[in-house]
Amino acid sequence: MPEIKRALLIINLHKMNAQILAEEITRELHRRNIEVASLAYEGIPEFKHQTPYDICFSLGGDGTVLYAARTVAPQGTPILPINLGSLGFIAAVHPEEWVEVFEKWLREKVSISRRLMLEITVERQGQIMTRSTCLNDGVIAASGIAKLIRLQVASETAFPRDFIRIGHFRSDGLIVATPTGSTAYSVSAGGPILDPEIEAVIINPICPFTLSNRSMVVPAHETITVEVEEEQRSGVLLTVDGQITEPLEPKDRIFIQKAPYPALLIASDREVFYRVLRSKLNWSGGPDA
C-alpha cells in the first residue's frame, strides 16, 4: 500500500461543481491525516512547486490533466483524473467514483497507465530559447493570415548515431503527437489513433500542399528535428498541449524527444481508453456493453 502524506488538488474553476468537489476531497483526505495543497485556477494556470506530492487529483477535463502532467510528472507523482466535463479520453473517473477509485489505488487494485511524454526544445542561433514538456502534442503552425509554412523535418537516433532526413513540408503546420495525443488535434487532421501505452510518436502535416505528404509513426527513442525555413509568408508559432505558445523565427530548430519520465495516470488504462473510443466514435453499433 502506498504511503500518502501529501496530496495536491488541481482545480479548474471553469468546471461546474469543481470547488464543491474539491472541498469534499479535502475533508476526506484530512480525515485520513493527509496534508492537502490546492491550486484553483481560471484561464491559464501558473503554478510551480518543488516539494513532491504522493498523489495529485485533477478536477476538470482532459485539458486539466495535461496541465497536471506537465506540473507533477517530473516528480513521479501519480494523477487521479476526475472528469467534470464531457466524456474525456484521459479524465475518465466520474466525481461520484473518486473515493472508490482512491481506495482501490491504495490497495493496489487499480492500474496505473504510464503515458509517454515529449520534451520540446527550441534552439535559436545555437542558444536554447525554451524547453517544455507535453502529454498530448507540439504543433508548429502559421500565426498569420497566410497559412502555408515551410519546414524541414529529420529524425536522429543516439545509439547508433544516425541522422535521417524525412523531408520538406509545405503545409498549414505540423503536429508531433504522443499516443495519448493521437485522439486530439492529430486525429482531426487525419492522423492515426494509437494505443495510449505504446512508445511511438506521430508526425502529422496539417493540410499539406503536396497530397503525397502523409502522417507517419516513428519510434519514441528517436529525436525529431524541425527547422523553420527562411522563406515564410507568415509568422510561425509553436503550441505545446494547446496551452503554451512560443513564437518561432526563421532558422529556429525544434528538437522533440521522449521526456525522461512518463505521466502516471490512475484508472485511465487501455480498457478505459477503448471504452471511451467506442463511445466517442460510435464503434459499438449500439448501447455500450
Image: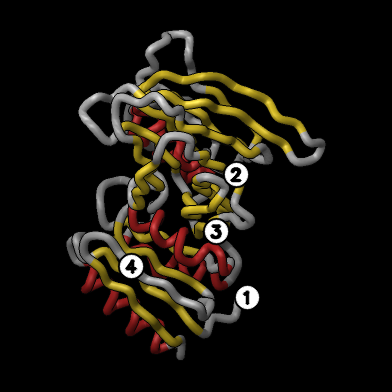
Q: Are marks 3 and 4 in contact (CB under 8 Å)?
A: no
On screen, residue 84 above or below 152? below
The CA distance from mark 1 to mark 2 is 33 Å
x and y, in percent, of residue 12 in the image: 26, 64
Q: Are marks 2 and 4 in contact (CB under 8 Å)?
A: no
On screen, residue 32 above or below 87? below
Image point (48%, 17%), residue name:
214
Front label number (4 vs 1)? 4
Q: Choose the circle earlier in sequence order: 3 or 4.
A: 4
Image point (19%, 66%), residue name:
17
Which residue bears the numbered disc 4? 46
Of the residues shown, which amino acid type is indicated by label 4? Glu
Among all residues in the image, which is located at the extreme right? 160
As helix, strand or loop, the secondary structure at mark 2 comes to strand
As helix, strand or loop, the secondary structure at mark 4 comes to loop
Q: Choose the circle earlier in sequence order: 1 or 2.
A: 1
Q: Residues within 10 Å of mark 1 (few under 14, many from 20)?
A: few
Q: Choose the circle earlier in sequence order: 4 or 1.
A: 1
Which residue bears the numbered disc 2? 257
Which residue bears the numbered disc 1? 1
Horizontal side of residue 79 vs 38, given as left or right: right
Q: Choose the circle earlier in sequence order: 3 or 1.
A: 1
Front-lying residue, 85 or 135: 135
Front label number (3 vs 1)? 3
Image point (57%, 69%), residue name:
75
Of the residues shown, which amino acid type is indicated by label 2? Gln
Horizontal side of residue 159 vs 114, given as left or right: right
| Image quadrant where one finds the N terminus | bottom right
Q: Residues within 10 Å of mark 3 (few under 14, many from 20)?
A: many
One can see residue 289 in this view = no
